[in-house]
Image: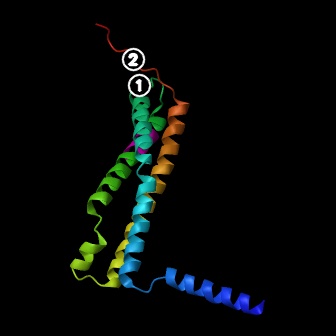
Amino acid sequence: MKIYHLFMIVVLAAVFTACVSNDPAEQELALQQDVMDLHDKIMPKMGEFNKTKQKLMQVLFLAPNLDMPTREKLSEVAGNMGEVEESMMTWMNELQNVKLLRGEKKSHEFIMDYLNKEKAKIEKVGASMDGLTTAAQAAVDAHPVKLPNPASK
């Protein structure tokens, strides 16, 4: 029985060692995949984010009884939503591929640092999107507006 346990420990150690790569290129690709997985988790939220932003804009333009402090607060939320949307687009346009960085002869340390910074940026964008969506939806719920009927022909 002791031999079986020893054998299992050796097998598990070998499997664990195989999973944790010491190859810099593999580490870089794995981190790049983590970054892209985060992006892929956040990107589908953009549709709901934009819909909520549009509803917030309707509140700002169509709610007749908003006092000035409330209007200013909601305008700030809408502005922040625009900034987050722009941050997402900028991040996507500026993200560099590991293979391109390798082709530019960037060091492993540079690439890992770059990817970790990009990961932090996309995490911040995602957190901002979530927080602003919640704030905007609360404002929309608190200030329902009736949309005007389109002119009939």
Q: Which one is in front, 100 or 124? A: 100
Circle 1: residue type? Leu
* Tag 2 residue: 148
Quarter that holds the C terminus: top left
What residue sits 27% from the left and 63% below the top?
94
Task: Say if residue 116 shows up in the picture.
Answer: no
What residue sits 31% from the left and 53% below the top?
89
Q: Which one is in front, 97 or 64? A: 97
Where's residue 78, x and y in %?
40, 42
Residue 76 falls within the magenta-colored stretch: yes
Where's residue 52, x and y in %?
44, 38
Q: Which mark is residue 3?
A: none
For disc 2, the neighbor class at 10 Å (few under 14, some 14 to 19, many from 20) is: few
Where's residue 76, x and y in %?
41, 44
Query: Tags 1 and 2 in contact by the CB under 8 Å rule?
Result: yes
**Above or below, 144 relative to 45:** above
Q: Which mark is residue 62?
A: 1
**Above or below, 118 relative to 152:** below
Q: What residue range appears in magenta?
A: 72-79
Q: Nearer the viewer, mark 1 or mark 2?
A: 2
Quarter that holds the N terminus: bottom right
Main SS, magenta residues: helix
